């Protein structure tokens, strides 16, 4: 069946979603998010031309961070497009303190879309890579108010994805079966399938972490990284490379394409007992993508997707990517012995 709303029309993406077994409601939801990311890509290019991309809006967002004008524009685009989808009843955004309820949602199913409209927005001022991250949850039948329904539905994850606004605009998606990469055709403004079998190798020799916080890391992270950088003569017996783009989407995309291990740990000594990244719209989407690609996703010693949130902006430590490396850091006894 064709997608009814023309704004969400994107035949190659729709075809792929159908092949994954996604029903009309899920296809409409993902296509709306894809349309939002295509529009965001255009905004980023335009604002850069106008020289206003890095400008602050004067607003402090719910995270206590100064919002850029672009954060606000991207957030609004996601809201506008998603609210046209009848099944999307709840929206959770990094930029909004509460759950937004979509009044145009008369369907029998209730989906929630949780998103960070502009991940790594600090990179905008220097024209470096940023992204958008999202997941779709099925809240149908969940009890309580809007927030309780979303919080109790994180295990009913139907889809996850991110857009990467780099030299090309890419969209990486999963519905839990495969991880596919689409590229935005700049002429048609439609996404085209590039690859649909992205896999993360279990071993890796590259890691991503902000080394400046090394004195503040928990001991297992300090030991793990120290052993990696000790190189061939160290306990790991091999050389490691390191990357840090300052945007999780950019660092994780490298992990998906080239392999590797991304870590943003808990840092109690820095006053961040659960780290910096947010569970609902950063951790959970990347965890679904990483696991579907054959990788692993941990929050400390717990599987990230098993964490039951108690608030929509809850933070989480993350360790994502190559399975052997993620499990080694999490303290898997077999791998600890092997190292
Ligand atoms: P943001 O959503 O406010 O942009 O913050 C999240 C970003 C991640 O993309 C990135 O991995 C991290 O913050 C970088 O943090 P730090 O500056 O502490 O290295
Ligand atoms: Mg973010």
Image (cartoon, rainbow, N blue to C red):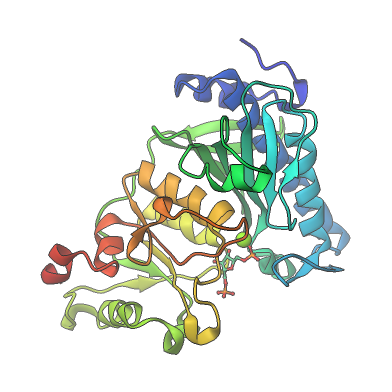
Residue 169, can we see it? no
Q: Is residue 174 visible?
A: yes
Q: Position of residue 30 (x, y in %)?
A: 61, 32
Residue 4 vertical position relative to residue 263 in the rendered view, above or below: above
The residue sitting at 45% across, 86% down in the picture is 216
Q: Position of residue 303 (x, y in %)?
A: 35, 55
Figure quadrant of the N terminus: top right
Which residue is at a point 65% across and 48% down the rendered structure image? 147
| 174 on left or right of 330 | right
Q: Which residue is the extreme one toward the front? A: 144
Q: At which x and y percent is residue 101? A: 75, 40
The foreground one among 194 and 32 is 32
Q: Position of residue 36 (x, y in %)?
A: 72, 40
Looking at the image, in which quadrant does ligand 1 appear?
bottom right
Toward the top, the furthest residue is 1
Instruction: Describe residue 166's horizontal placement relative to residue 286 as left or right.
Output: right
Residue 58: image quadrant is bottom right
Task: Tell me where residue 223 sits by quadrant.
Answer: bottom left
Residue drawn where x is 73% and y is 71% of the image: 65
In the image, taking residue 211 as reference, residue 135 lies left or right, namely right
126 relative to 44, above or below: below
């Amino acid at each position: 069946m064709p997608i009814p709303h023309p704004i969400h029309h994107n035949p190659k993406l729709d075809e792929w979603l159908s092949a994954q077994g996604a029903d009309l409601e899920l296809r409409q939801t993902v296509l709306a998010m894809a349309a939002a990311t295509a529009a965001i890509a255009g905004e980023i290019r335009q604002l850069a031309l106008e020289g206003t991309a890095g400008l602050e809006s004067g607003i402090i967002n719910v995270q206590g961070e100064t919002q850029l004008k672009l954060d606000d524009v991207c957030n609004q685009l996601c809201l506008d497009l998603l609210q046209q989808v009848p099944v999307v009843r709840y929206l959770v955004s990094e930029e909004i303190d509460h759950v937004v309820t979509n009044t145009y949602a008369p369907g029998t199913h209730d989906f929630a879309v949780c998103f960070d409209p502009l991940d790594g927005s600090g990179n905008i001022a220097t024209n470096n890579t940023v992204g958008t991250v999202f997941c779709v949850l099925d809240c149908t039948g969940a009890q309580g108010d809007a927030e309780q329904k979303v919080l109790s539905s994180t295990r009913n994850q139907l889809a996850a994805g991110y857009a990467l606004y780099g030299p090309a605009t890419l969209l990486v998606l999963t519905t839990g079966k495969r991880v596919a990469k689409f590229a935005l055709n700049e002429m048609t403004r439609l996404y085209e399938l590039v690859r649909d079998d992205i896999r993360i190798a279990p071993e890796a020799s590259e890691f991503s972490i902000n080394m400046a916080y090394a004195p503040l890391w928990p001991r297992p992270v300090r030991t793990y990284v120290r052993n990696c950088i000790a190189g061939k003569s160290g306990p790991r017996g091999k050389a490691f490379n390191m990357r840090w783009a300052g945007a999780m989407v950019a660092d994780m995309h490298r992990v998906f394409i080239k392999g590797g291990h991304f870590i943003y740990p808990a840092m109690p000594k820095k006053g961040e007992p659960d780290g910096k990244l947010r569970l609902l719209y950063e951790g959970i989407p990347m965890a679904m993508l990483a696991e579907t690609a054959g990788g692993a996703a941990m929050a400390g010693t717990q599987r990230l997707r098993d964490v039951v949130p108690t608030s929509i902006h809850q933070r989480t430590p993350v360790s994502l990517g190559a399975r052997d490396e993620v499990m080694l850091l999490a303290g898997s006894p077999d791998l600890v012995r092997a190292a």
